[in-house]
Image: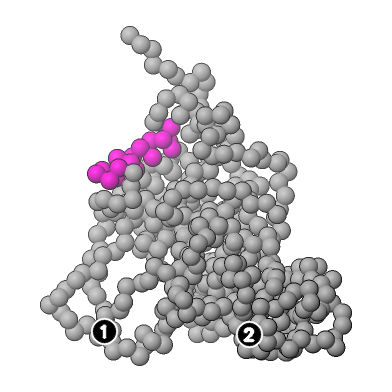
């Protein structure tokens, strides 16, 4: 009889120290008493521009202070421009967009606004008859009639030129642009400046650069690991699960692997290094709307909802089993029974039963979306993917990984909020500004898995 291989020593999980990053994750949480929608959304744009402008101004001066102010160095595409030949010196900074002078090389800082006819408009929705069916959401807002605008407190100007078009901007980002006003009243861009990566807390121990796809086979699996999953969609009969015919089998295999009951000795040895699990949204199937054709007269286009508690019970069973072996962090997603406005608030712990509710806040943590998670010295920024999904509708060409990396260079993880992405109307802050660079940046519920390393 063949001997069953066993580990040479009992396997133990690394003990981790969970750090509550209240200074970063705190603004994403708000209580019922402090929550109000009486404020205007314009405050978010003013605060965003004011805070990012100071950062960009230093970078712009550093990049363009020695640039000659005459257009002989940068010949404009518009040959009808009347150049200012009397001005001497370097390119100058103009604090207000509407104060830009024609024929003089200047740089300005403002908020990008993408003028796209295909974007949804709340004013158009209000003017429609209340019985008219709402059109399905568009996969993209891109069309040939799009234009790139830059605005500040004084006004707005249209940006032109290949440089700005190659940037593939989205609404809401703060940038600095170098150029001059054309005869048509547009601002022709010859260079741009981004806020760049925010400062990062240095690690006392420098981590090795590891390819997660090759770590196990190359013997680099020693150390502490964090498991990241998203899009479980429990209750889905067929869809994104690995085994479409029986998605519950795939979920059970995942649970067995995480708790160390699947695979051989090498698999169990590697899984024992996983210190905690982070579920990044879309854990259950979305609630289905009943199509009641007999009741066509609905007040405010209201539909009846068909709620099935089975997916939530299965999720509770999964969380209960995994949490007995390692701590679990749970984020809501776009398909979960949670609010749709960002930041999504944590799930109430009582809905997951007595056992999970009785666990300590470090063993089972219901997080906001987005959220910051501290594991030892490592700071993890995680979101369930709505931010990237909405930004991807503004562009054609860049991959999702490139857009995710762009948010770090823009220092803003949700620039399209509140234009086309619903968010809470903050009055005194914009919590989506990245004041600190995470060590790990996670965007869940994407079409495929990918990793990359950003340096700067």
Q: Position of residue 118 (x, y in %)?
A: 42, 78
SS label for mark 1: loop
Q: CA distance from mark 2 to mark 1?
A: 39 Å
Visible residue check, residue 112? yes
SS label for mark 2: loop
From what the image shows, is residue 135 above or below residue 5? below
Q: Position of residue 170 (x, y in %)?
A: 55, 71
Q: Position of residue 67 (x, y in %)?
A: 81, 72
Q: Position of residue 38 (x, y in %)?
A: 50, 85
- Res 243 → quadrant: top left
Residue contact between numbered discs 2 and 1, judged by CB atoms under 8 Å: no
Give 102 or 29, whichever is nearer the viewer: 102
Give 152 or 262, whichever is nearer the viewer: 152
**Residue behind mark 1:** 132
Give 395 or 30, whichever is nearer the viewer: 395
Estimate how packed mark 1 is, as few (under 14), some (14 to 19) or many (20 or more) residues with alpha carbons within 10 Å. few
Nearest-to-viewer mark from 2 and 1: 2
Left or right placement of residue 106 versus residue 369 in this view: right
Left or right placement of residue 383 versus residue 300 in this view: right
Which residues make up the magenta segment? 243-261
At 55% across and 57% down in the image, what residue appears?
A: 402
At 35% across and 11% down in the image, what residue appears?
A: 2
- Res 178 → quadrant: bottom right
From what the image shows, is residue 26 above or below residue 90? above
């Amino acid at each position: 009889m063949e001997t069953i291989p066993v580990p040479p020593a009992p396997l133990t999980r690394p003990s981790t120290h969970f750090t509550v990053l209240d200074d970063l994750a705190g603004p994403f949480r708000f209580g019922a008493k402090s929550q109000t929608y009486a404020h205007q959304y314009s405050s978010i744009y003013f605060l965003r521009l004011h805070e990012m402008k100071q950062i960009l101004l230093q970078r712009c001066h550093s990049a363009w202070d020695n640039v000659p102010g005459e257009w002989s160095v940068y010949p404009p595409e518009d040959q009808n421009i009347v150049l200012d030949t009397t001005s001497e010196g370097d390119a100058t900074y103009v604090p207000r967009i509407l104060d830009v002078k024609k024929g003089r090389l200047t740089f300005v800082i403002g908020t990008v606004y993408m003028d796209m006819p295909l974007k949804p408009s709340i004013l158009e929705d209000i003017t429609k008859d209340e019985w008219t069916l709402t059109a399905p959401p568009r996969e993209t807002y891109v069309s040939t009639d799009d234009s790139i605008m830059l605005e500040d407190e004084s006004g707005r100007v249209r940006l032109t030129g290949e440089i700005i078009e190659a940037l593939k901007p989205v609404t809401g980002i703060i940038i600095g642009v170098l150029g001059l006003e054309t005869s048509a009243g547009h601002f022709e861009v010859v260079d741009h400046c981004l806020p760049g990566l925010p400062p990062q807390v240095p690690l006392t121990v420098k981590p090795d650069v590891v390819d997660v796809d090759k770590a196990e086979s190359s013997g680099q699996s020693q150390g502490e690991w964090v498991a990241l999953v998203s899009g479980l969609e429990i209750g889905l009969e067929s869809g994104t699960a690995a085994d479409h015919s029986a998605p519950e089998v795939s979920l059970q295999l995942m649970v067995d692997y995480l708790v160390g009951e699947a695979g051989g000795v090498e698999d169990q040895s590697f899984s024992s290094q996983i210190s905690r699990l982070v579920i990044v949204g879309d854990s259950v199937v979305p609630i289905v709307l009943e199509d009641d054709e007999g009741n066509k007269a609905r007040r405010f286009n209201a539909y009846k909802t068909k709620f099935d508690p089975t997916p939530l019970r299965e999720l509770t069973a999964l969380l209960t089993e995994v949490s007995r072996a390692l701590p679990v962090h749970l984020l809501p997603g776009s398909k979960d029974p949670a609010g749709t406005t960002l930041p999504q608030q944590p799930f109430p712990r009582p809905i997951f039963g007595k056992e999970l509710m009785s666990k300590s806040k470090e063993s089972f943590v219901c997080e906001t979306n987005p959220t910051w998670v501290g594991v030892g010295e490592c700071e993890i920024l995680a979101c369930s993917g709505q931010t990237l999904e909405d930004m991807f509708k503004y562009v054609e060409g860049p991959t999702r990984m490139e857009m995710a990396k762009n948010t770090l260079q823009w220092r803003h993880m949700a620039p399209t909020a509140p234009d086309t992405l619903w968010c809470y109307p903050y009055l005194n802050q914009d919590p989506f500004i990245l004041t600190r660079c995470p060590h790990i940046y996670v965007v869940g519920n994407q079409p495929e898995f990918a990793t990359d390393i950003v340096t700067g």
